[in-house]
Image (cartoon, grey):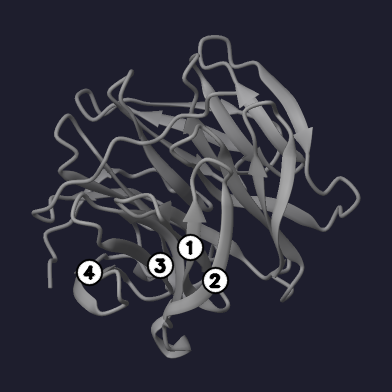
Amino acid sequence: MVSDVELVLDAHAVLGEGPIWLPADNMLAWVDIMGHRVHRFDPLTGRDESFDVGQPVGAVAPRASGGLVMALRDGFGLLDTATGRVEMIADTEADIPGNRMNDGKCDSEGRFWAGTMAFDARPGAGALYRLDRDRGVTRMLSDVSISNGIDWSLDNRTMYFIDSLSGLDAFDYEPIGGQITNRRRIATIPPELGVPDGMTLDSEGYLWVAIWGGWMVRRFAPDGRIDREIRVPVARTSSCAFGGPDYADLYITTASPEPGSDEHAAQPHAGGLFRVRPGVTGRPPNQYRG
C-alpha cells in the first residue's frame, strides 16, 4: 500500500475529474464538471489557470493542432486555450436534456471516445460515443449508467471501460476501424468499498482506477487481480493520470462533499488535486486528430 500522497493544488473543486497530461505545455489539464471549468495546472510554478466553458464539462484531451477537445453537456466541443473560445462541433444527446457527457479519452487513431449519464445517475440512461476525425459521431454502447474510465492495452488490442454502476470491463478492440466486441467483466468493486470511476494505464499495462467513496486509487493487473492501493485523504477520488517529464507522477482528482455536511468538515482538502510517485511510469496521451 502506498500512502505518501501530496496535495499540490487545494482547488476545492465541486467535481474535479478528467486529468490528462499536456506534453506540449508541460501542464496537467483537468476539469471541474459542475463548476463548468477546464483547468491547466503548471507543476513547476504551482499556477492553475481555468476557462469557463459555460456548461458541465466531463473530460478533455489534447488536439494535435493545438487546444483541447471536450466532452460537454451538449456534446463534443473544442477549446482554444489561447483565447478561451469554445466551439461546439457535434451533438450527442440534444434530445435528452436530463443527460450530460462524462469521462473520455482519445485512442491511437486520433478519435475521441466519451460517454454520457443522467444528471440523477439513473441506471441505463447513458451511452458511449466515438467522435471520429471527420467529426462524425457513432454510438458504440447503449444502456450505460455512468460512463466513466476508458483506456487501451499496450498492444492496442483491448479496450478497458468502466460503467460505474457495473464494474470494469474489457472489449476486443480493432484499432483501424475503432470497433469493439466480446465484452467481459474484469473486476467488480463491492458497493461498500465504493464505485469505480476514472482510470489510466501505466507502461506495464496495469490499470489504475479511482474508487469513488473509497478513499483510494487501486492498481489492477490486466486479469483483474488487485496489485496495490494508494490511500488518499479524500473519500471521493474521481480519476487519475500520469504526468511530468518522465510520466512518473500520478495525479489524482477529487470532489467535494455537500457544503456544510459533517463529511465536508472532516475533509478540508476535498476537491483538491493530489500527486504521488508510485514507482511505475505512465504513457504519453493520445491526441485528437480531427
Instruction: Work out how far the residue at label 3 is from the one at label 4, CA to CA, in angstroms.
Output: 19 Å
Q: Which residue lies under the disc numbered 3?
A: 265
Secondary structure at badge 1 equals strand
Which residue shows up at 51% across the image and 71% down it? 261
Q: What amino acid is labelled 3 in the image? A: Ala
In terms of sequence position, does the residue under pointer 2 or pointer 4 come before the other?
2
Secondary structure at badge 4 equals strand
Camera-side residue of 63 and 254: 63
Crowding near the residue tagged with mark 3, few <14, some 14–19, many ≥20 C-alpha atoms within 10 Å: few
Q: Which residue lies under the disc numbered 2?
A: 182
Quarter of the image that includes the C terminus: top right
Are discs 4 and 1 less than 8 Å apart at CB?
Answer: no
Q: Position of residue 199 (x, y in %)?
A: 39, 58
Q: Position of residue 233 (x, y in %)?
A: 27, 65
> Which of the 4 quarters of the picture holds residue 131?
top right
Q: What amino acid is labelled 2 in the image? A: Asn
Q: As displayed, is residue 147 above or below residue 47?
A: below
